[in-house]
Image (cartoon, coloured by chain):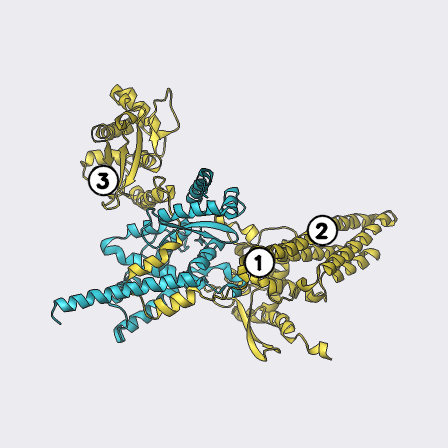
Chain colours: A cyan, B yellow
Amino acid sequence: MITHEHLQKGSEVFFSLLENKILPLTDARVYSYMEEPEIREVVKAMAQGAGLRILDTRENLHIVSQARDSIFATSYTHMKSKYKLDRKKYFYLANIIICIYLAEIDKENDIRVRWEEEGVTYYKLEEQVTKVLDSWKTRLDEEDGFAEEWGIAVEEIYDIWNNDFSMYKESKTGDVDVQRNKNTRLGFIYEAMRPLADQKLIINNVNELKIIPKIELYERLNYLYHQRDRYKEIMDLIQRTEEGIADAENNRNQDNGL
Amino acid sequence: MDRVEKGLKDRLKKTQAIRMLGTGMDVGDLNDYAHEICLLLLLKIFRREITENPNRTRQDLIYMTEEILREMDFAASKEVAERLVDGVLWYKDPNRQDPFSCYIFDEETRSHELYKFRYLKPDREHSQWEKGGSTVYMLTEEAQEIIFITREILEEFGFDIEQFYTLQLIKSGNFNKAQNSVSNLIARVRTLIRREKDYRQDVLRNPQIIFMDSKNSRRKSEDEIKRQFEDEKKVFEDMFSWKNRLNSFPAEARTEAEQVFESLEVARALHDVLAKLVVENMAFEVEIRVKYPDSFWKTSNLTFKKDIWQNIIDKKGLANFDVLESLLNPLFSPEVDFIYPLEWAWEEQKIKKTEANEEIYEDFDEEETWQPKSADWDIIVELWEDIFDELMKNNEFSITELQDIDSFKKQKWLMQKKNIELFMMFVVTEVELKLEEQETNDDRLELFRRLCDKNPKYKKLIGRRISSVNEEDKEPLRWEELYVSPYKIKLLPSKSNLE
């Protein structure tokens, strides 16, 4: 039975999570969450109502967005809002950079060796991005195995990366300056990774040009992408979208009398 | 005979680490000497670790290397020193920061397996990354072993041999050597302590390692471990019993001896810490097994890297980028409304201005320049009167309304930073308009005070709150020197209106 006290305590937990984003298990508020199932229920219900989700790991409690329709902005949606209309392709590029970074640092749970968490250099990341874009571009030119919208976006991204951006710019002291030069590859990498840095999921070391993952990032990766049921959710989402597009195309073809 | 051939893999790990030291770079003429320069560098870094000296950043390493080159009488440039350092930190290309690696034969699987290692790793405790500090480096265990091996004390024998060695030295009054030995003892214990701390974290992150085999003496039973610590404690006591003989030693040896016993005390204290940690960790293992039983039978080995990125996004692509966005969105925590992160707001404004500043200083020698001195409040009041009038009339004001004002007024706005800064202050947090008696530190309230002073009609606003919103669909304010996001400040309805 959920009592008024449970509601009260639950809200406390919920709002402090909202304020702090991540709370360690040693925090008193989190303790009540872990110990009392009624409080857990309350918090989870509140999260769901707000379009959010609670993650608990052995060290921390996280609060994150759902895939869509959360009423809250995040540093990620803020980045999205900076790139609207004809600048949307920059947002797409940033997404790809984030994915590549995650792929670089992600490992299966049991083979993650401690020193491998030392991060990825800007140069290495840039190399990877170039590689991926090159291989996609080749595929586009040759077989065209991509969905239409995806393909168009890839062309645009490839264009930005190769034609608009220079590699990096140096500051007056001769060091590479990634914070002020968004129109360079390394500078845009800085931009793309900022939502993660703002949420303290990575350390963006601009002096040594290295991006270091924090344990909180691994916790989220583990929860969001290593679990079977989540994987199924993701596959469903992908499938639904593909079907939706296929349907739309069919309708269009029908309308055109094909 | 069995024992001699067994453990080939482990032996190879040690010999390969020695063999590859100095091969991480190309230093031309000095290539023949790279190995010894690198070894000396590792020794110097290790010395700093033991003496609690945190000056072990890459830059420090370069200075140390230059010192070494001088000691060895090599005329070499700073560039060579840099290459040597990078070649100890990483294998070949410093931009990639790859580890060292080689294939070694595993007798059990009867195949060659990839062995990766480094000589130096970031010392997280001393690096202070979160404060923007440079990375401080420390020796990995592989590198430490090279140093110990070359003193003929093999890792496998662990702590005790070092202790006995020290005891012998003390007994024979050889305090000079004893001091070094005790320093190594301390380093040893520190390493073991670090290992225990790391282990605890690792278990928390992946409990399954409790059951994985490891070469550490973890597989000893609790009794065996307790006995081992008792033995080691006894040796310490033995060593200390020799302190009583101090008086019988000649004067010079006495100060040295005292130093040795001081260090020994440190070692003993650390040893107690270690014992405590080991026992705690054993209890911790049990705790984890009870609390999180399901983490031991997890069979999923899905990863973002393989199953989502490689197999789907990279291989086939998605339908469109909106899907990708849905995939990444859940990574992020919500930002709470109205408390717009200060950094973003300042940063946008600051960075554009910093770039522009340089241009302005170059072009304009006469008239208006940025005034670094204290703000001219008359101008502020003059400019902001208009805004407050607007607030009183329409209850809101968007900064974008300034876009097309006449150039005379625009210049006034641009005359000092505070004019626009004030707007950002209103944006960042809500404020209740209070009439202060005197000058106040809160610039917003100071503005309000002066406005009321100039014209009492503004007193009508006392008690009202000013909040803000980001009109994301609008274009930002763009003047040549300035760029501000399209914020709007609003006068919130007073309580009486609501009732």
Report, in whole angstroms, how far the alpha carbon at label 2 lies from the one at label 3.
66 Å
| Image quadrant where one finds the C terminus of chain B | top left
B411 relative position to B175: left or right: left
Marks 2, 3: nearer the viewer:
2
Dot 2 or dot 3, earlier in sequence = 2
Dot 2 or dot 1, earlier in sequence = 1
Can residue B85 be seen in this snapshot?
Answer: no
Q: Are marks 2 and 1 in contact (CB under 8 Å)?
A: no
**Snapshot quadrant of residue A101:** bottom left
Three-letter code for the amino acid on which mark 3 is drawn: Thr
Three-letter code for the amino acid on which mark 1 is drawn: Val
Residue B203's disc is 1
Report, in whole angstroms, how far the alpha carbon at label 2 lies from the one at label 1.
22 Å
Given residues B92 and B454, the one toward you in this image is: B454
Residue at left 29%, top 59%? B322
Can residue A160 be seen in this snapshot?
Answer: yes
Badge 1: few (under 14), some or many (20 or more) residues near its Cα, within 10 Å? some
Badge 3: few (under 14), some or many (20 or more) residues near its Cα, within 10 Å? some
Residue B400's disc is 3
Three-letter code for the amino acid on which mark 2 is drawn: Asp
Residue B272's disc is 2
Give the residue furthest to the left.
A257
